[in-house]
Image (tube, rainbow, N blue to C red):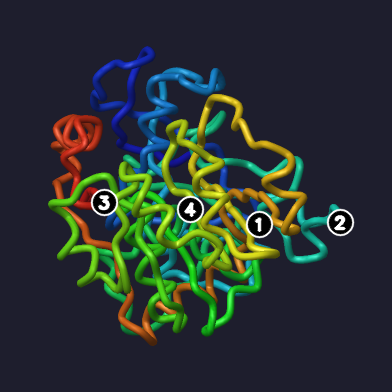
Amino acid sequence: MTTVNAFAADAAGGKLKPFKYELPELGSDQVDIKVHYCGICHSDLSMLNNEWGMTQYPFVPGHEVVGEVIAIGSEVKNLKKGDLVGVGWNSSSCMHCNQCMEGNHHLCDTAEATIVGRHGGFADIVRSHWSWAIPLPEGIDMQKTGPLLCGGITVFSPIILAGVKPTSKVGVIGIGGLGHMALKFLNKWGCEVVAFSSNPDKKEQILAMGATKVINSKDPKELDSIRGSLDFVINTTNVTLDWNAYLSTLAPKGRFHTVGAVLEPMAIPAFSLIVHEKSVAGSPTGSPALTRTMLDFCVRHTIYPIVEEFPMSEVNEALEHLEKGKARYRVVLKA
């Protein structure tokens, strides 16, 4: 048995308090990871507040874990003690269904989410199946890696799924925790990148992140100025927008892709899609293999999120900072 020191909430919206629990004997295909850093994602807040109706209490958040392997099961071949790894939204999958066998482990029907039905990474130790303990490439900045394992792969995966080319003209809606990473990826991909933002005060910073142009999303005239010009638009916000206005910015055969967890139904007129063969899609995170590719791409091009660091002991202050919209742009806890 392994004792874990963590921070947990007892009820929806509750404060996190020190919490100890015991892990059972390590499975033959599992690894234990000493947590060095853990990012805070908005999904941690959603789960803490039980917005999705599936949180179990006591609840230990944290699914952007970066750390060191300290124990390995007898059947683990690809990792050894001392290896530096990361764990994102998923911590296990069945390894035998069609999705897993085709390399789409994140689409496995029985995939285990790191903070659903089990305890996450706001702790000194977190456990994972070996396949989801992603080896970190040499030279990566560990302090800034955690947010890449959830938010980063969430916005990187659609670039691959949509077949975005270096010659594509693309758009990013919402330049926050997710959107600023999408901007950086698409800039280094070689794209002309239009950023949609409702905050004019952020224009210069957004341009410095790699945007070619910044459009005021509250100004219909500015939206109309790029009508029919974008090959790909990614939505990173979780609020209801004028979807038809954004669809109008797409070129023929353009793709609108949402990764923002919009809770209300999206009102999309059929003819906005039919006339110019446009499409609407969505996706969760990504597979272990694609996550490795993303991390290599990040090291090659020095792509990292902008982060603010808090000690793990100040986890409640860090969560409040995020919930009040003060984070610029991701929050990371140091163990």
Tell me if label 2 and label 4 are in contact, CB under 8 Å. Answer: no
- Which of pointers 3 and 2 lies earlier in the amino acid sequence? 2
- Numbered badge on residue 88: 4
Q: Secondary structure at mark 1?
A: loop
Q: Which residue shows up at 37% across the image and 12% down it?
A: 11
Confirm or deny contact between disc 3 and disc 1 (CB under 8 A): no
Which residue occupies the extreme bottom position in the image?
300
Calculate the distance from the C-alpha at mark 2 to the C-alpha at mark 1: 20 Å
Q: CA distance from mark 2 to mark 4?
A: 22 Å
Asked whether the residues under the numbered discs 2 and 1 touch, taking CB atoms below 8 Å apart as contact, a structural biologist would say no
Within-10-Å neighbours for mark 2: few <14, some 14–19, many 20+: few
Q: Which residue is mark 2?
A: 98
Q: Which mark is residue 29?
A: 1
Please name the amino acid that badge 4 sits on. Gly
N-terminal of the pair, mark 3 or mark 1, is: 1
- Residue 215 appears left or right of 75: left
Q: Which mark is residue 330?
A: 3
**Residue 78 picture location, percent across and down:** 60, 74
Residue at image position (44%, 84%) is: 190
Question: Is 77 placed left or right of 270 in the picture?
Answer: left
